[in-house]
Amino acid sequence: MARTQGSHSDITGPRIRKAALGLFARHGYAAVSMRQIAGEVGVQAGALYNYTPDKQSLLFRLMHDHMLELLSALGELPVQKDPTAALRQFIGFHIRFHLQRPDEVFIAYMELRNLTSENFAQIEILRRQYEDILEGILKTGQKDRVFSVADTKIATLAVIAMLNGVMTWYRTEGRLTLDQVEGVYWDMVRRSVTE
Amino acid sequence: MARTQGSHSDITGPRIRKAALGLFARHGYAAVSMRQIAGEVGVQAGALYNYTPDKQSLLFRLMHDHMLELLSALGELPVQKDPTAALRQFIGFHIRFHLQRPDEVFIAYMELRNLTSENFAQIEILRRQYEDILEGILKTGQKDRVFSVADTKIATLAVIAMLNGVMTWYRTEGRLTLDQVEGVYWDMVRRSVTE
DNA sequence: GTTCTATCTGAACGTTTGTTCATATACGGT
DNA sequence: ACCGTATATGAACAAACGTTCAGATAGAAC
């Protein structure tokens, strides 16, 4: 019989994950202790174990939730028949979604090696799904002769890598607006996949 | 008076750095203990302190040496007056140099946050120097109207990010030769910076 | 008002951490 | 053959680690 009021469990759980997210992103999974996370939440270390079986599961949950959100948000975009429009939409989505979640993205790319092999395999499947969607766009465009790349798989990875680079330098207080950034990257990506 | 023969110091030092390099790359700086490094070298943990004042300095040295090598190797390339030739040469150099040193590169990009702020600042200066060389090529090409990018700084970062992506998937036993990979990336980069 | 239970504390556990240091070893110089 | 010293050992240090758990606390249910 779960409590509906006065209980802290509905609040403490998310707060723990939020604290862990920030600390993992800033210092790395291995360098963050359960006591640091607890301290940020204002609770003793033992209390964390009401919300996660162990530290590893905490990391996995953060990454897993993030990937599900990513795929779900991408799936909600309107279908674009034109490959160019589809690619354009993907670029904009990717940049905005990732810039809104710098910590999640950072962890998703940096902490893969700290997952157990079972957990790693699960995340990899989700990541592959995301890549496959972009590659599908490129393949369609290739077939329609609107895109021209030597290898759609490499082009997919190259585009994603290029886009992810934006997170290492973009700051909201910088000299470029989000629209401008999107425009610059779209220009470069579009030209890189067309003759 | 340093020993010239029979001494292990000339051998143990490099072996320690090599072991640390591999372990840091595979498991991350924070997740690797001095005892693991020592074990890989076949020595007790205390012996490491004849070669490094502490763990942090060991990491810094690896990153620092790598950056110096990178800049030095780049500096030895023949000067190319033509911006297109210069860019082409840079792409090839970057891909080959980095693929030859996967561990060093991985550490240089992943372990920045585990450096003390003083050490971080030093590495950042070197990295900036490398980026500036690429941006110089783009600027020259821009001036000569052979390249056309909205922003040379962003284009620089985008190109480097794109190239670095190759290390996440390239395997020597894969279906593409190094020459082919270089060709594919050169095609994409060239098109992304020209009209 | 009593009971029940979800939640948290605080101490404890056995390991492991980075680092230090007195001591041992073995080689180079003389 | 002896000395000096570069190099390694192996034990020790305090601190921090992830995790467990008996007990305190306080709100919900009746």
Image (cartoon, coloured by chain):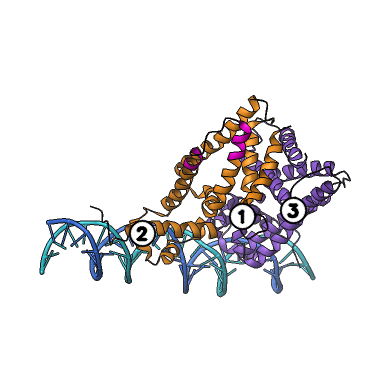
Chain colours: A purple, B orange, C blue, D cyan
Mark 3, residue position: A131
Mark 1, residue position: A20
On the image, the x and y values in percent for residue B65 come to 44, 47
Q: Judge whether residue A28 can be spotted in this image.
A: yes
Task: Establish if A31 lies above or below A171.
Answer: below
On the image, the x and y values in percent for residue A50 come to 64, 65
Q: How many marks?
A: 3
Instruction: Name the residue type under label 3.
Output: Glu
Which of the two labelled residues, at mark 1 and mark 3, occupies the earlier sequence position?
1
Left-right relation of B102 to B19: right
Residue depicted at x 60% and y 28%:
B140
Magenta span of residues: B72-89
Chain letter of mark 3 equals A
Which label is found at residue A50?
none
Chain letter of mark 2 equals B
Q: Are marks 1 and 3 on the same chain?
A: yes
Residue depicted at x 61% and y 35%:
B85
Q: Judge whether residue A106 can be spotted in this image.
A: no
- The label nearer to you, 2 versus 1, is 2
- Of the pair B80 and B27, the residue shown nearer to us: B80
Q: CA distance from mark 1 to mark 3?
A: 27 Å
- The label nearer to you, 1 versus 3, is 3
Mark 2, residue position: B11
> Where is the C terminus of chain A found, in terms of image quarters?
top right
Q: Are marks 2 and 1 on the same chain?
A: no
B84 within the magenta span: yes
Chain letter of mark 1 equals A
Residue depicted at x 42% and y 55%:
B55
Instruction: Name the residue type under label 1.
Output: Ala
> Where is the N terminus of chain A found, in terms of image quarters?
bottom right
